[in-house]
Image (cartoon, rainbow, N blue to C red):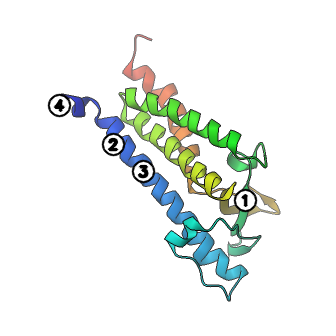
Amino acid sequence: MAAFFERKKKPLVGLALIIGMILVDQLTKWAIVERVLMPARHPDMIPLGLVEWFGNPDKLGPVSITVFPFFNLSMVWNHGISFGLFQSDTPYFLIGLALLISVIFAVWLWRSTAWTQAIALSMVIGGALGNVIDRFHFGAVADFFDFHIMGWHYPAFNMADSFITIGIAILVFDSVFLEPKRNPSK
């Protein structure tokens, strides 16, 4: 039994990271939407607690708060994939796609032998599942980080999108620079 846990240490740590990333993503979404943006749009409303928020599928309307000259917190409901691509009013295809990719990446995580792969795969899975929760809950993903310069806005995003993007970047870096060193015969 100890040998099993030793061989599967990376995937088990990856599972803990996935859970942690989902929690960070969902807590961030709740805190920013309910505790920051909701009072800015509806100052007379009492923000929902975390448990109540998950039971309330009402979506906050447009609101934006300037934090820095280049950064706003702006409520955007993303009906597409990351960064607003492939907009759709029916979330079921995107939920299914995200779950399929998560399963494929989970199998890869289970077989991973490198820490960089395990961490990167966990980031992508955790981010994807965080956004899937939003799609089930709201029919869209809550995005609010809005960076801009001279009138040009980078597409709004959230912590889950950040985890996915960083995870993919680490996977690319790993495959280009680290994998050849781990397997020099290939």
**Which residue in the protein does label 3 denote?**
19
Marks 3 and 4 in Cβ contact (< 8 Å):
no
Question: Which mark is first along the chain, 2 or 3?
Answer: 2
Query: What label sits on residue 61 in the rendered view?
Result: none
Question: Which mark is first along the chain, 4 or 3?
Answer: 4
For the residue marked with disc 4, what is the amino acid? Met
Q: Nearer the viewer, residue 85 or 131?
A: 131
Query: What label sits on residue 77 in the rendered view?
Result: 1
Left or right, 181 with respect to 105, comes to: left
Question: Which mark is first along the chain, 3 or 1?
Answer: 3
Outermost residue to the top? 185
Q: How far apart are marks 3 and 2 (CA)?
A: 10 Å
Marks 2 and 1 in Cβ contact (< 8 Å):
no
**Which residue in the protein does label 2 denote?**
13
Question: Which mark is first along the chain, 1 or 4?
Answer: 4
The secondary structure type at the circle numbered 2 is helix
Which residue is rendered at x = 65% and y = 82% of the image?
A: 39
For the residue marked with disc 2, what is the amino acid? Val
- Residue 71 seen by the camera: no
Which residue is rendered at x = 73% and y = 47% of the image?
A: 80
Q: Is residue 152 above or below residue 114?
A: below
Marks 1 and 3 in Cβ contact (< 8 Å):
no
Question: Which mark is first along the chain, 4 or 2?
Answer: 4
Q: Residues within 10 Å of mark 4 (few under 14, many from 20)?
A: few
Outermost residue to the right? 151
Q: How far apart are marks 1 and 3 (CA)?
A: 23 Å
Query: What label sits on residue 1 in the rendered view?
Result: 4
Q: In which quarter of the image is residue 12?
A: top left
Q: How far apart are marks 4 and 1 (CA)?
A: 46 Å
